[in-house]
Amino acid sequence: MPDKDPNQPPTDPRVQPPFSSKESGSSPHRPGLELVEEEVARASGAALPPTFAAFAHRNYRLYWFGNLTSLTGTWMQSIATGWLVLQLTNSPFFVGLNSTLAWLPAWIVSLPAGAMADRFDKRKLMIGTQSVLALLALALAVLYWTKVLTIYHVLVLSCLSGFAATLNAPIAQSLIPDLVERKNVLNAVALNSAMFNSARIIGPSIAGVLIGTIGPGGCFGINSASFLAIIVALWLIRLPPPQPHGSAESVGQRIMTGLRFVRGHRDIRTLVIMMAVFSSFGIVYLPLMPVFARDVFHAGARGYGVMMTCIGIGAVIGGLTLATVSRTKHKGRILVFGTLSLGILIIVFSFIRDFRLALPVIVLIGFCQTSIASLTNTLVQTLAPNHIRGRALSVYMLAFNGMFPVGSFVGGAIAQRFGAPAATIVGGCAVLVSLAAVSVLAPSVRRL
């Protein structure tokens, strides 16, 4: 379930910050946390390069490095699971179905998770979800090692992991702005994306080797252990008690308040629609990568790992580039250009049959993918008032996580009938058509 950063792939895809009420439009200024952060910044040498400005905050450093370790294990399991499903079934449809079941819970728990993020202690909620994910990874490893694992076990555990990961996603995303100052939110989100995709480089590289030596079970076991890093980091993070807003509301009422807010906010509504299309069609290639590796490029498990690593390399470059220019005033224009480039690159990738020629295109796809996800995420975070940010992000995450299984299912069905390249051609064309529609119907996006 790694793309619930998402950003991304996908991907991804986490107390109130020291904003004044004038800055955020919601919560009062909280000097205690700000003084702590200023003290840390001075002690660490104060002047960090602009690319790494968010690292001046101790809480963010803990979160970043703990998550890097955990997500490396998660990517190892993701690669091993995709390859295992293809081995067990020899069916592109089942590869897509496994991805669909992993992301389907987004339709059930994304909105309640956002309401919980705005009401309860995000740090404790995340410790709970990460612990559940660790136990599910351990169960998958034990079933594999005892030689009783079937495709149905994989599908059920993928779905259960999907529930925990989807519950975690809006909570984790809404936590990030609480770890840094307002001016560093885009920088923190971009560095978070770079971290997520650094794990995407490291995890698949290790998994590609381990699958052929100790088998997928080893990847599952390592992933289970890796969750300790983020759990310990969350315990060490120091935040003031959460400040409740509208605590008398029920969860259902809070969800409806969030939905009404997104519906009534033109720019956030447009961004959510763009993310739904991006998730449905712009990353349809991702669950089909095992099929491309084996049947199109004949590159095997190691080739699959290399392809996923290339996506990660492009995504890390994209994340660091975005972190460097995090204070740009032209985020909307960059978002539109990135979406246009992604659609074209996916179509180009669909026609390539040489493994070596495909790799640089995959790097560029990763660059565009993470830029789109990070920019959209940041715009939603900064446009939404502090007290409703978790619920606004939960709608955004529903668009991302909820539409991905739809794209995976359709992509898997098309790949089963016409081949994986046909599925990605459809996805790339859909991205371009939707971008044209947004440009005509909602031109204000370019001015964000």
Image: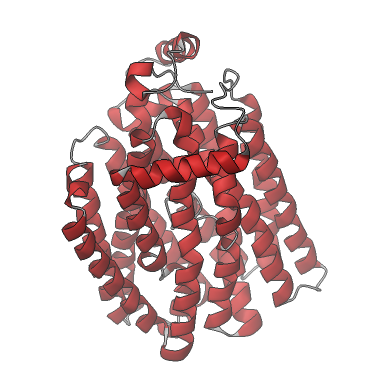
Which residue shows up at 25% across the image and 50% down it? 335
Q: Which quadrant of the view contains residue 354?
A: bottom left
In the image, is 241 to the left or to the right of 383? right
Height in image: 438 above or below 416?
above
- Residue 272, position as x, y percentages in the image: 37, 52
Picture quarter with the C terminus:
top left
Query: Percent x, y for residue 179?
Result: 48, 26
Foreground of the two, 307 or 288: 288
Asked if residue 73 can be seen in this view, the reply is no
In depth, the one of 140 and 385 nearer the eye is 385
Q: In the image, is residue 63 above or below residue 267?
A: above
Residue 120 to residue 211: above or below = above
Left or right: 312 as drawn, with respect to 218:
left
In the rendered view, tell whether residue 123 sits above or below residue 334: above
Q: Residue at x 56, y 61 (%)?
A: 103
Q: Is residue 347 visible?
A: yes
Residue at image coords 41%, 55%? 312
Q: Position of residue 45 (x, y in %)?
A: 38, 15
Asked where in the image residue 75 lies, by quadrant, the reply is bottom right
Q: In which quadrant of the rendered view does residue 186 lie?
A: top left
Q: In the rendered view of the protein, which quadrant contains the N terminus?
A: bottom right
